[in-house]
């Protein structure tokens, strides 16, 4: 019973659950805000009513999703203090600043302009109204930057000094904090991946209608936009992912070793990348494996003769530096999360390429499986994003702030296991129920299709379409 | 001036912004069963805050982040100490926020009623519990030498704190109803005014008792001054509402809430989280704050961006200045 009520374990599960859940909505918000802004810009510039209909169609989906992103985000901020008060005391001086900047510069911007956008269709001049969705989109992207800068401090602490007397990290260089090499790679990697998810959503919704041979006038341009978006963002995600892995090898070699389950330091051709491995359940013995020689060396160091430090060697180094302890993350989690992230990511680049080929010059594939694959792009691209974050956060363990504070020392000392259990159960229940409602509503909005809007009145040039009301 | 002291007042300002703005959202939410005779009425009520509830709610996110950044110890003690109370607030805010967005997605009555109740409860719970939380902060709670809260949820539910909770509940309710009178037209506007008169009378009595209790237990000169402003504004708002001066009534309600929240911070000063068991364990502006460097960075950011933020938020309210009527809803509901 006492093990069940371990506050540390429960608080970790709660953080994992609420963060993964929150992050289901974040990439959709970021990606769709910008996509809606692009569609609306096309409408304003060309006057083609199809673009307006696409904007309103994805706008509705965006809004259903947006509220969930907001309310689950508050949990994230409160949770640091509630479950991780020792962490908050330790890093507040450093970590709090980007959070405050995020609130002031990003959250206010998106929260204010989203209201103007939703309710401003018939109240604001056309171009001003267009500016509101761009302001919202900028707000969402800025917020990602600040929170990733904060997260990067946990991966690779920079710009701080330790104050032994107060037992905390103190900020000495905000610029170093905001230009953390991990943040500079993780930010574009994450944003590009957000666009993979939103492109996946656009492809899924468009494919659902095109497979039924309906709404061709809007869903064909939407599909094309989604496929190109997926291809470009997929390429960028890969490029910055590569940059991020270089930064990771330089700052958290243990994470790279754990990603590849490399126990001993390997060089050159031996630094191979296993595509698939079957091993004994404890992960120490390999039974079967498909390996690509040199690839790990190439990924980690951008050279064929590079060396990748192994878990055992790093463990020995860390034990000397930080005292006795186990400094490796849970290997099977990092190993498989890393593979699923890359595998699903690559799969989507392939989906985009094949999709663009099949629909070249206005062609419409007849085979059902093509559309089935397309409809699955959304859930699978979202899954790729989630396993990516699971990898980066689980790979940081056992540290909450790498090399400075172990996770086990960060939990609130006065919060009981029962308290955390109550909140974990409460969040699981309410999040579970809302997930069902959310999925149903999004599916309903997708099936309903884009709204019918008559072309502009030839005399006034005005378009009649209804304003949003709650 | 010491930057930590400056940030004490900036945090106060952010909470004032939150309670003045989301306060009327809570009030509008709680007024649904009193003012909403049918679905169109309820939609009128919800649409008075439709474009702004999200930006209003964002004030608490910013206030929380400012607390974290400027006073990490205060943030850590408060949030881990008031654990279950904050959990209830979070669940309520989740329920309320999604309901605004979900309720109009389907036409069935049962569907809408379910989300109406989530809005009502999701508004009432934070309106009550924020008052309980702030009253406890001012009164002091048991803290150990590491500044960790040593009480339980039930220690927070003491008579003084419950009176504080009832005060914010009633203040926000009246604030919201006065806002409805300002933002609607026709029958519902008249009903809102009448309800504000009745609710306002009860609010005056309860709020006055809470302020007097606070004053005798923790009062300073600044507290009494601000409390007097709050009391005068509350009575003034009540009178203005009786005369149908809706804009004056609403402005004075905002002044009431602002002055009352500042008064509580004045009663707290220079502590941020007094320990009721041993003053040596208290968190103060001094021992809870971040380094001057961090505070300098944030001061510049706030100095540059707060005026801009206030400007674009003010503009939003100006864009949506029109009253919401049943006709607005009917015209849009196809």
Image (cartoon, coloured by chain):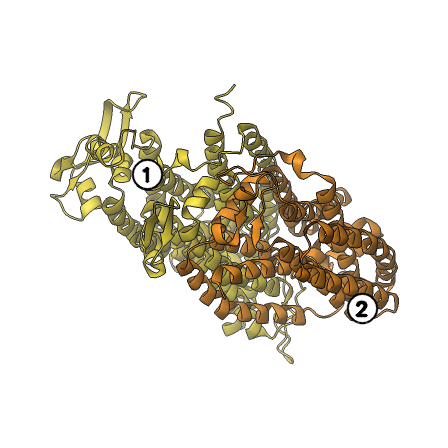
Chain colours: A yellow, B orange
Assess disc 1: are there few (<14), some (14-19) or many (≥20) residues with their C-alpha within 10 Å of its C-alpha: many
Q: Position of residue A183 (x, y in %)?
A: 34, 53
Determine if marks 1 and 2 fall on one subunit. no
Residue nearest the observer in this picture, B165 or B95: B165
A138 lies left or right of A349: right
Q: Quadrant of residue A108?
A: bottom right
Rendered location of residue B178, percent (x, y): 79, 61
Residue A198 disc label: none
SS of the residue under disc 2 = helix
User: Which residue corresponds to mark 2?
Assistant: B246
The residue that disc 1 covers is A338
Label 2: chain?
Answer: B
Q: Position of residue A461 (x, y in %)?
A: 61, 77
Residue A466's image quarter? bottom right
Q: Is residue A48 visible?
A: no
Evaluate whether residue A61 shows in this view: yes
Residue A330, compared with residue B230, is above or below; it is above
């Amino acid at each position: 019973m006492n093990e069940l009520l371990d506050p540390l374990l429960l608080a970790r599960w709660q953080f994992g659950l609420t963060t993964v859940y929150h992050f289901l909505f974040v990439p959709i918000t970021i990606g769709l805000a910008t996509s809606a802004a692009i569609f609306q810009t096309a409408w304003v510039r060309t006057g083609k009513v199809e673009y307006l209909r696409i904007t309103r169609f994805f706008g509705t989906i965006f809004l259903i999703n947006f509220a969930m992103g907001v309310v689950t985000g508050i949990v994230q901020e409160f949770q640091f203090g509630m479950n991780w008060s020792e962490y908050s005391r330790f890093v507040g001086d450093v970590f709090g600043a980007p959070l405050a900047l995020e609130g002031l510069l990003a959250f206010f911007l998106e929260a204010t302009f989203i209201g103007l956008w939703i309710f401003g269709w018939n109240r604001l001049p056309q171009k001003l109204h267009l500016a509101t969705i761009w302001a919202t989109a900028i707000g969402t992207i800025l917020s990602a930057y600040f929170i990733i800068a904060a997260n990067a401090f946990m991966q690779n602490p920079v710009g701080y000094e330790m104050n032994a007397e107060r037992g905390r990290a103190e900020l000495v260089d905000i610029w170093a904090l905001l230009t953390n090499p991990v943040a500079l790679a993780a930010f574009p990697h994450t944003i590009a991946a957000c666009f993979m998810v939103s492109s996946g959503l656009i492809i899924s919704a468009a494919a659902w209608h095109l497979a039924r041979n309906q709404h061709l006038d809007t869903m064909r341009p939407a599909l094309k936009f989604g496929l190109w978006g997926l291809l470009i963002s997929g390429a960028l995600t890969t490029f910055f992912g590569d940059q991020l892995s270089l930064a990771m090898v330089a700052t958290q070699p243990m994470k790279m070793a754990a990603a590849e389950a490399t126990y001993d330091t390997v060089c050159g051709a031996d630094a191979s990348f296993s595509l698939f491995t079957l091993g004994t359940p404890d992960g120490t013995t390999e039974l079967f494996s498909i390996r690509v020689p040199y690839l790990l060396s190439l990924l980690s160091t951008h050279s064929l003769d590079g060396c990748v430090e192994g878990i055992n060697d790093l463990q020995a180094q860390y034990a000397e530096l930080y005292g006795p302890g186990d400094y490796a993350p849970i290997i099977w989690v990092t190993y498989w999360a890393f593979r699923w992230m890359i595998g699903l990511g690559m799969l989507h680049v392939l989906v985009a390429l094949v999709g663009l080929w099949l629909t070249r010059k206005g062609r419409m594939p007849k085979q059902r499986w093509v559309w089935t694959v397309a409809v699955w792009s959304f859930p699978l691209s979202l899954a790729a994003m989630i396993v990516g974050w699971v990898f980066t956060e689980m790979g940081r363990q056992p540290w909450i702030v790498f090399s400075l504070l172990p996770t086990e020392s960060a939990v609130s000392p006065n919060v009981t296991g029962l308290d955390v259990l109550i909140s974990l159960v409460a969040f699981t229940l309410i999040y579970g129920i809302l997930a069902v409602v959310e999925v149903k509503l999004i599916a309903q909005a997708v099936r309903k299709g884009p709204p019918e809007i008559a072309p502009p009145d030839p005399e006034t040039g005005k378009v009649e379409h209804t304003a949003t009301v709650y | 001036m010491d930057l930590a002291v400056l940030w004490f007042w900036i945090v106060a300002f952010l909470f004032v912004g939150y309670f003045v703005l989301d306060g009327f959202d809570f009030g509008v939410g709680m007024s649904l069963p009193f003012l909403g005779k049918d679905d169109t009425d309820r939609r009128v009520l919800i649409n008075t805050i439709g474009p702004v509830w999200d930006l209003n709610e964002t004030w608490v996110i910013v206030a929380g982040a400012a607390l974290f950044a400027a006073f990490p110890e205060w943030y850590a003690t408060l949030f881990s100490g008031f654990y279950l109370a904050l959990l209830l607030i979070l669940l309520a805010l989740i329920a309320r926020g999604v309901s605004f967005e979900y309720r109009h997605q389907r036409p069935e009555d049962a569907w809408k009623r379910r989300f109406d109740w989530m809005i009502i409860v999701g508004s009432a719970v934070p309106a009550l519990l924020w008052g309980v939380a702030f009253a406890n902060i001012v009164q002091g709670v048991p803290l150990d030498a590491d500044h960790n809260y040593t009480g339980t949820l039930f220690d927070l539910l003491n008579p003084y704190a419950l009176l504080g909770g009832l005060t914010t509940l009633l203040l926000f309710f009246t604030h919201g109803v006065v806002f409805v009178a300002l933002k609607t037209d026709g029958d519902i506007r008249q009903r809102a005014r009448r309800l504000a008169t009745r609710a306002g009378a009860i609010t005056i009595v309860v709020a006055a008792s809470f302020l007097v209790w606070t004053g005798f237990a923790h009062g300073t000169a600044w507290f009494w001054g601000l409390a007097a402003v709050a009391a005068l504004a509350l009575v003034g708002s009540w009178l203005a509402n009786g005369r149908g001066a809706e804009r004056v009534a609403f402005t004075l309600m905002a002044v009431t809430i602002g002055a009352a929240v500042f008064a509580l911070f004045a009663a707290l000063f220079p502590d941020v989280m007094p320990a009721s068991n041993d003053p040596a364990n208290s968190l103060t502006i001094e021992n809870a704050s971040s380094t001057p460097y961090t505070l300098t960075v944030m001061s510049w950011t706030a100095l540059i961006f707060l005026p801009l933020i206030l400007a674009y938020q003010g503009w939003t309210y100006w864009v949506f200045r029109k009253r919401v009527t049943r006709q607005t809803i009917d015209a849009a509901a196809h």
